[in-house]
Amino acid sequence: MKNKIILFAMLLTGIASFAQQDAQYTEYMYNTVNINPAYAGSRGAMSFFGLYRTQWVGLDGAPKTGAFSLNTPIGNSRLGLGLGFINDQIGPTDQSTFNVDISYTVPMGETTKLSFGIKGSADFFSLDVNKLDPSNASDPNLQSYNSKLSPNIGAGAYLHGDNYYVGLSVPRLLQQFQYDDNNVEVSKAKMHYYLIGGYVFDVSPSTKLKPALLLKAVQGAPLQADISLNAMFIDKFTLGAAYRWDAAWSAMAGIQITDGLMLGYAYDMETTRLKNYSSGSHEIYLRFELVRKYKDLVTPRFF
């Protein structure tokens, strides 16, 4: 049984090396700056965001992701700044990413704005073979690996108004390779393309409804589509559901504890054969904003 679990962890590592590699989020709509640098500063307030996700609970070596970000407008200028950190653990692998985002916003009308952003990042990837149980421990190609600094750059655009948004981004424009001392490739990072969009409907004075879509594409993996529907009640409570095509159903809930503090949770139930081996995935986030310093901010905004 142990060997089967370890083999599964190695398969996850292989998938991460050649297919979709970026950390996955169910509640990406509250964590947009991590996938699109043009979002930085768009909320009009200094915003702190923390998230923890544990995927496929019950499987040893399943992904665990922690993310933290800060983004803010820079004074009264059209510039925005973002800083972020992501740690993604899958089986014997551990990847940490540091991000810096700069955005510039162009007014397109009375309420419409178009933002452009660039993302600078630095990745650190490591492989710990002590977490494996190889049949041939002396294999020279099987060794622990700690990567050197791997810089990258990304870009994005974000069009938004009072009740809608559309964004297109590529967080990593450079394809990266990691090799061990024997010149064996241990990691390959490819470009990921993100397209997001959403619209907020005012159903009543106390209820807002927001359908949203995320499309993620990368060479070597099927197109991923996340379709979600969230509702906000009396500007304090959110409830929602989402479907990740051919992967999972999700339930989401959140509460605006104060004008600047929001807490949210999501649960994913797998629709693939993984549901026979896992009890699902959990995601929790906390967002804090310094809203009182920015009187023009509409709080709470639904994206």
Image (spheres, rainbow, N blue to C red):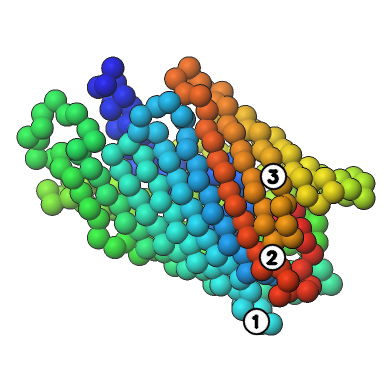
Instruction: Work out which quarter of the rendered image holds the C terminus and state it.
Output: bottom right
Tag of residue 75: 1
Question: Which residue is identified by label 3?
Answer: 254
Task: State which tag comes first along the sequence, 3 or 1.
Answer: 1
Task: State which tag comes first along the sequence, 1 or 2.
Answer: 2
Frontmost residue, 226 versus 100: 100
Q: In this picture, is 45 found above or below 23?
A: below
User: Left of 232 or right of it: where is 95?
Assistant: left
Question: Which residue is identified by label 2?
Answer: 43
Q: Are marks 2 and 3 in contact (CB under 8 Å)?
A: no
- What amino acid type should be assigned to the residue bearing mark 2? Arg
Give the Cα distance between marks 1 and 2. 13 Å
Q: Position of residue 64 (x, y in %)?
A: 43, 41
Q: In this picture, is 177 found above or below 239?
A: below
Q: What residue do we see at 62% from left, 41% from top?
A: 265
Give the Cα distance between marks 3 and 1. 30 Å
Task: Kindly state the secondary structure of the residue where label 2 is placed.
Answer: loop
User: Left of 259 or right of it: where is 5?
Assistant: left
User: Left of 216 or right of it: where is 236?
Assistant: right
Q: Are marks 1 and 2 in contact (CB under 8 Å)?
A: no
Frontmost residue, 111 versus 263: 263
Q: Residues within 10 Å of mark 2 (few under 14, many from 20)?
A: many
- What amino acid type should be assigned to the residue bearing mark 1? Gly
* Residue sitting at the far left: 138
Q: Position of residue 185 (x, y in %)?
A: 23, 46
- What amino acid type should be assigned to the residue bearing mark 3? Gly
Tag of residue 64: none
Asked if residue 42 shows in the view, the reply is no
* Residue sitting at the far front: 258
